[in-house]
Image (cartoon, grey):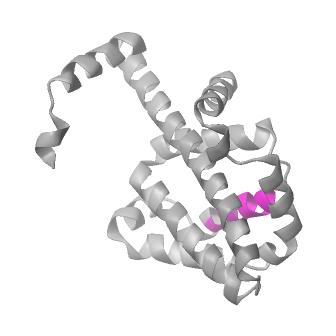
Amino acid sequence: MASHIAEVTEDVFSQLPPAARFTGEDEALLLRLGPGLASLEDHLVQGFYDILFAHPETARILSSGARSERENALRRWWRRTLEGPFDAHYWQWQAAVGLIHVRQNVTNPMMIGMWGWILNALQQALLETLRLLPHEAARAMEALHRLAATAQALTVESYMRHYLVALSQSTGVSTDLIQRLVAVELSSLDPSAQA
């Protein structure tokens, strides 16, 4: 499975335009801001899980485990993100989240929505709590948006690939054939009719 995660990670990085993905400059900036951002950990973790447990759909999924365990997982991610490095291991970890989400029934809309919440919470904190100047906060947000885009691309692609592999293995139909069947089926749909 580790080699599959590495393959997904490499494929995603080959598809993401360099200007849209997380960079070495972004890493240097986050590491420099790390001590200040670390002070936001409790606020982010509390807010993140308050939102998830307040929504019936996400609360249902989360009911199978202790909140403290889930909070600790987010804390580990936040600390590792602020300490670096953003190496292959880090990005493969983000891709592995897709597999975890398939197993735990966390949907991509749930994940993307919570990334949006994190970005909004960080933007407010950069200005109000850390008191960065507006141009410094804007630059930090650019880095955080590229981090989010890169992590989301890895998570979504891994989610889809693992879903496809599980479907293939459970049915005995090759992933290539499943993809061709999907393409044929979708070719008859007119997305403009939905607008």
Residue 73, visible in the rendered structure: no
- Give the answer, above or below, for where 174 lies relative to 101: above
> Where are the magenta residues, as a range?
71-83
**Picture coordinates of residue 29 (x, y %)?**
83, 62
Q: Is residue 152 left or right of residue 182?
A: right
**Picture coordinates of residue 187 (x, y %)?**
20, 23
**Farthest front residue?**
135
Residue at 35 percent of width and 18 percent of height: 179
Residue 75, visible in the rendered structure: yes
Residue 121 image-quadrant placement? bottom right
Residue 34 image-quadrant placement? bottom right
**Picture coordinates of residue 3 (x, y %)?**
68, 22
Q: Is 112 in front, or is 64? A: 112
Residue at 76 percent of width and 87 percent of height: 131
Classified by dominant secondary structure, the portion drawn in magenta counts as helix
- Give the answer, above or below, for where 79 lies relative to 16: below
Residue at 51 percent of width and 35 percent of height: 157
**Picture coordinates of residue 89 (x, y %)?**
78, 38
Magenta stretch: residue 176 in it? no
Q: Is 86 in front, or is 136? A: 136
Residue at 54 percent of width and 35 percent of height: 158
